[in-house]
Image: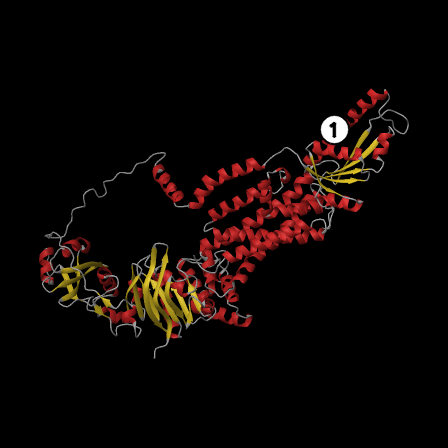
């Protein structure tokens, strides 16, 4: 019984309306060099990706080494090597660094890694280039490095997707020598290519055409298929001067089914009536001018013939035993069709020497703006096929204009105020009503003790605190000056200035109104101070807390720290992952057994360290350059900064899951950043925004971090003061990371 390494059974894959692979079935024995051939776009890479577990099949079944490719991909990845069509190792790492990286990805211990490192270096012959950056290697050396990385963990099966594409013939031969050596050691090789000479070197081959597998078997057996050289036909090789000029006249001869250039010769499939003598007669040459000999078909002849005559689902001759698996007559499509008769062409008397009409006569336009129309139309084609760009260009600005136009309001109203009324009588209540009637203040809390009064301000729940003394009404009745203390949070200079001016003006207006009544009724001074001098009845004593000089930097710089940290982490993370996707290195990682958590944590942790270092730097700049002291607990601030960085990294990861290119990543990151700047309270008070938008600001994570920053840095708040913001930031971090991890898959879409 044959030992099967790879089994594919009615495997299909669709991408929307496009069918990339249709109902493919074949087996690959252990130790074989299986060549999957076909033109570009026929589905070769798609089959490899499904076998490697990074692309789910739409239907059918595939297994590698006995493991199901759809349900057990991680078990497969530990035992296979993968060499992608495009060089997908890290160009900015050296040869040795790339090899060590992939060795660690596969979990090789130090001793084994060192041994395997030496073995693959010796096998591939790259010992002289270990310290060279991978991106500076030539094509052939890049392929050697990619093969070495694919072999570092001693895989049982190696998938090579067009490994010799784009390299010179010498490098191609050297690479195949390495593959033969691997096959001799029992490694199963699955190679895709569109080079027919490479197919001749495989032990078994399959041929894809238009997403369908039309034949599968051993090269020598496929050449003997009846449809390749039908009964009553022969294949000839003609050696003649100017073979290209003779091609069309040969094809026009009745009985010639095919004529193809093969180097400097012509391969002809002809019926008996189209003998070499008939060909010489048509070409107008003698036997001294031409040499001909019968030949056997090449694999190129096999595949060209079968491609031309392939009918989906039915071929005319069974392959029987000419296949590499016991059941491949059904799996490979079953039968091979007969070649179709080419349409008749006018008979030519000899080689055509005249030039085709118009050839070489076209004139190119030149000028300062030459090519403008071509570039213009090309760019519009790109834009038309890029939905993200259209959305970003046409809809996002409209939405942002509407939202920000409604949300942004520089008028300061409804400043949250806490009242500590120790008097409680009619005059004290009238004073509170006067504060509310200005519409500048809004009472959010009334407290009964000094500690709660101050904590309400330090926590940021109130920006203004009004303390009415117990003897307020008594002083007014006795004709003495009553003093009211107004504490103002000066961290936001704009809000503080408005509150201070409004409170002072309110005190003056109340005093004038009361003085007018007293003067009218009694013709005496409305109030006198302790020395007997006439004074205003009510004195509003405002006191600025936290920022007595009303320096705007004290408000904006801490907020700027939060915005900068989100900007750096968001763009770094999103671009780093999307860049790997564009370069193909992410696909290479998907084929390895690295866990999703290991991939993400390993990818994000360095940026988290960098971002935390950036936090220390910007906080130092804030303290020493802008002279903004940190009044609260620095340790608490750093811990909560770490929580915010985790959230920002999650946002970057989310952007990377919805972006396919770095341009899209930039666009989506910009969409996230703009609300973070304008709606988070960094520039404009959230309390002044319309209720729907104000509620929406709670979905912006940086909102909570700005509250935390300003509370700890400016007001000296402790953990108890900022519990709501901490809960909000923690919830945002959990939601963002969970959603991002759910969207991130170790598979291609």
State the image coordinates of residue 439 (x, y, percent, origin top left): 68, 33
Quadrant of image for the C terminus: bottom left
Up-down: is 49 above or below 464?
Answer: below
Q: Give the total of numbered labels.
A: 1
Image-based side of 578 in relation to 706, left or right: left
Q: Nearer the viewer, residue 23 or 155?
A: 23
Given the current orientation, which residue lies at the most extreme bottom position?
Answer: 1
Question: In the figure, 692 relative to 169: above or below?
Answer: above
- From this viewpoint, is residue 352 visible? yes
Dividing the picture into quadrants, the one containing residue 64 is bottom left
Q: Nearer the viewer, residue 387 or 688?
A: 688
For the N terminus, give its image quadrant.
bottom left
Q: Mark 1 points at which residue?
A: 505
Q: Can residue 167 be seen in this view?
A: no
Q: Nearer the viewer, residue 725 or 649?
A: 725
- Compared across the picture, whether 289 is left or right of 315 comes to left
Which of the colour schemes (rainbow, by chain, secondary structure, one colour) is used?
Answer: secondary structure
- Using residue 746 as the reference point, say whether residue 732 is left or right of it: right
Q: Is mark 1 on a helix, strand or loop?
A: helix
Q: Residues within 10 Å of mark 1 (few under 14, many from 20)?
A: few
- Asked if 121 appears above or below 19 in the picture, the reply is below
Q: Residue 679: which quarter of the image?
A: top right
Vertical comparison of 528 with 26: above or below:
above
Return the x and y of residue 107 as percentages of the image width and height.
Answer: 53, 68
Report the residue at 91% width, 27% height from top: 531
x, y percent for residue 156: 42, 72
Counting from the top left corner in percent of width and height, residue 132 is at: 49, 59
């Amino acid at each position: 019984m044959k030992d099967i390494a790879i089994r594919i059974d009615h495997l299909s894959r669709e991408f929307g309306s496009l069918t990339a692979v249709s109902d493919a079935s074949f087996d690959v024995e252990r130790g074989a060099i299986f060549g999957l051939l076909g033109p570009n776009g026929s589905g070769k890479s798609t089959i490899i990706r499904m076998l490697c577990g990074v692309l789910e099949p739409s239907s059918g079944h595939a297994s590698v080494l006995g493991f199901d490719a759809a349900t057990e991909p991680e078990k497969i990845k530990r035992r296979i090597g993968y060499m992608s069509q495009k060089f997908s190792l890290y160009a900015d790492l050296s040869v040795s660094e790339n090899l060590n990286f992939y060795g660690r990805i596969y979990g090789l211990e130090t001793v084994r890694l060192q041994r395997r490192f030496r073995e693959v270096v010796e096998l591939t012959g790259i010992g002289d280039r270990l310290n060279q950056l991978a991106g500076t290697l030539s094509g052939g050396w890049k392929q050697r490095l990619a093969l070495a990385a694919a072999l570092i963990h001693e895989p049982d099966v190696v998938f090579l997707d067009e490994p010799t594409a784009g390299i010179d013939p010498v490098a191609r031969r050297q690479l195949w020598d390495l593959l033969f050596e691997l096959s001799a050691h029992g490694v199963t090789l699955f190679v895709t290519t569109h080079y027919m000479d490479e197919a001749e070197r495989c032990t078994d081959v399959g041929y894809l055409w238009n997403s369908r597998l039309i034949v599968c078997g051993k090269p020598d057996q496929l050449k003997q298929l009846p449809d390749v050289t039908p009964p009553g036909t022969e294949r000839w090789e003609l050696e003649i001067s100017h073979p290209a000029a003779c091609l069309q006249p040969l094809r026009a001869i009745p009985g010639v089914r095919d004529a193809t250039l093969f180097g400097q010769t012509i391969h002809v499939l002809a019926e008996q009536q189209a003998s070499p003598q008939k060909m010489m007669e048509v070409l107008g040459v003698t036997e001294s001018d031409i040499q001909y000999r019968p030949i056997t078909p090449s694999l190129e002849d096999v595949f060209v013939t079968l491609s031309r005559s392939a009918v989906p689902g039915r071929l005319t001759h069974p392959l029987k035993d000419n296949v590499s698996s016991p059941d491949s007559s059904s799996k490979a499509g079953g039968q091979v069709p007969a070649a179709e008769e080419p349409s008749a062409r006018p008979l030519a008397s000899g080689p055509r020497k005249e030039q085709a009409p118009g050839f070489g006569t076209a004139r190119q336009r030149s000028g300062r703006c030459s090519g403008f129309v071509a570039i213009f139309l090309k760019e519009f084609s790109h834009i038309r096929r890029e939905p993200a760009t259209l959305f970003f260009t046409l809809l996002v600005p409209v939405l942002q204009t509407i939202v920000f136009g409604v949300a942004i309001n520089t008028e300061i109203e409804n400043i949250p105020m806490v009242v500590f009324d120790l008097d409680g009588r009619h005059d004290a209540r009238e004073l509170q009503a006067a504060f509310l009637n200005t519409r500048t203040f809004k009472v959010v809390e009334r407290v009964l003790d000094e500690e709660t009064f101050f904590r309400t301000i330090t926590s940021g729940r109130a920006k203004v605190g009004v303390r009415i003394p117990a003897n307020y009404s008594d002083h007014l009745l006795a004709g003495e000056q009553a003093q009211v203390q107004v504490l103002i949070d000066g961290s936001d200079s704009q809000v503080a200035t408005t509150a201070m001016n409004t409170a002072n003006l309110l005190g003056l207006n109340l005093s004038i109104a009361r003085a007018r009544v007293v003067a009218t009724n009694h013709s005496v001074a409305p109030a006198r101070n302790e020395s007997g001098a006439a004074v205003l009845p009510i004195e509003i004593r405002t006191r600025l807390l936290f920022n007595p000089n009303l320096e705007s930097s004290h408000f904006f710089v801490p907020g700027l720290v939060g915005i900068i940290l989100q900007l750096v982490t968001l763009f770094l993370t999103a671009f780093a992952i999307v860049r790997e996707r564009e370069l193909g290195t992410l696909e290479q990682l998907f084929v390895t057994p690295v866990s999703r958590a290991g991939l993400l944590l390993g990818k994000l942790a360095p940026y988290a360290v960098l971002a935390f270092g950036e936090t220390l730097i910007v906080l130092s700049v804030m303290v020493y350059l802008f002279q903004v002291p940190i009044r609260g607990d620095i340790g608490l601030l750093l811990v909560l900064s770490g929580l915010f960085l985790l959230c920002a990294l999650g946002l970057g990861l989310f952007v990377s899951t919805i972006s396919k290119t770095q341009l899209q990543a930039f666009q989506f990151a910009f969409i996230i950043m703009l609300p973070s700047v304008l709606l988070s309270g960094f520039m404009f008070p959230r309390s002044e925004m319309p209720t729907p938008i104000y509620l929406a600001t709670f979905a912006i994570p940086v909102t909570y971090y700005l509250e935390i920053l300003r509370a700890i840095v400016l007001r000296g708040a402790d953990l108890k003061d900022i519990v709501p913001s901490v809960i909000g930031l923690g919830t945002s971090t959990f939601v963002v990371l969970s959603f991002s991890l759910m969207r991130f898959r170790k598979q291609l879409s």
